[in-house]
Amino acid sequence: MLASKKDKPSLLVLVGPTAVGKTKLSLQLAEQFGCEIISGDSMQVYRGMDIGTAKATPEERKRIPHHMIDTHNPDDPFSVAEFQDRVRALTTDIHERGKLPFLVGGTGLYVESVCYDYQFTDVQMDEQLRQELDQYAETNGDDALHAKLVVIDAESAERLHPNDRRRIIRAIEIYQLTGKPLSEYLAGQTKAPAYDLCMIGLTMDRALLYERIEARVDQMMEEGLLEEVQKLLAHGYNPNLVSMKGLGYKEMVSYLNGEYSLPRAVELLKRNTRRFAKRQLSWFRHMKDIQWIDVTDGANFSAHYAEISAIITGKIVQNCEYNSSQ
């Protein structure tokens, strides 16, 4: 049984932008340190959305137990508050099995909500306002709705993708009901660690990261991203669902609707993913407990791995006790 010598249970966390190499590293670390992996990606909960969300393969999931993958249908409601509740329960279960919970992902708010004593705003909902904003987005486009948020809460707008209609509407709603931007609520969080944290962040040269993003998009297309989206639509999932607004899905839907050609859709997906990676890095840079590792030199993977392994050993293993069952 793995137990922290401190008052709080241990949690290993690996973050970084999309395509930086979290999956390969997380699998090896999980094997070395006896971990079970918890996906920290807000889109991987949706069933049938495998290629576009870059889920761990079935083989990888057999290699290491993974959690928070395929828990919801694409039309099921899902929130960061639910994610926080589920992952908190999961970490307890994993510890009870004598394993180390390992949160891996790139959705900043979701990861942060678990790592710290995050309290979500209790501002009530205004259903009429939500419907009006949703209709505004339908008429004028998601970019126009996002532009509304830029005016009242530029910081939240920077962190939210223009396609993330539901969260943009919630941010506008909070401002309209309270006169206080969401970013101000978030800044007021005490953010006391909920765990004995060991947080590793991966970064690399921006130009190289963008090359890797473009190569990943090409690979997703070869693996059948377009066919995956067609199948979801054939199952009756509405293109306006939050899940279908995710990267890769929105662009393919727009192509299928005849809004632009397939090469243009792929070009936009690459551009949008580059912008998303930039926002991911911006979010994680504000998290003070992350120890950053530059993995630009891919030929030095073994050296990067050794450095990260030493950090984990020093931070978690030396602060924990193992019983004979470990």
Image (cartoon, helix red, strand yellow):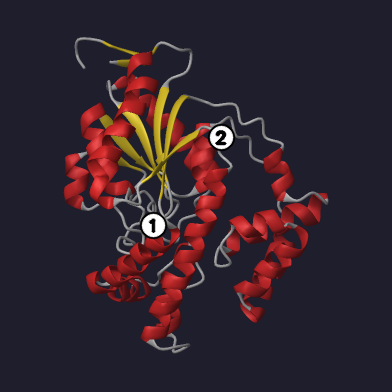
Q: Secondary structure at mark 1?
A: loop
Residue 152, given in percent of the width and then of the height, sits at 77, 60
Q: Which residue is mark 2?
A: 288
* Dot placed on the residue nearer the N-terminal end, 2 or 1: 1
The structure residue drawn at horizontal position 28% and vertical position 25%, both measured from the top left corner, is 99
* Residue 33, visible in the rendered structure: yes
Which quadrant is the C terminus positioned in? top left
* Residue 122, visible in the rendered structure: no
Establish if 129 lies above or below 252. above
Q: Amino acid at mark 2?
A: Lys
Q: Amino acid at mark 1?
A: Asn
Q: Which residue is mark 1?
A: 73
Q: Nearer the viewer, mark 2 or mark 1?
A: 2
Q: Is residue 76 left or right of residue 223?
A: right
Q: Quadrant of residue 253?
A: bottom left
The structure residue drawn at horizontal position 36% and vertical position 27%, both measured from the top left corner, is 311
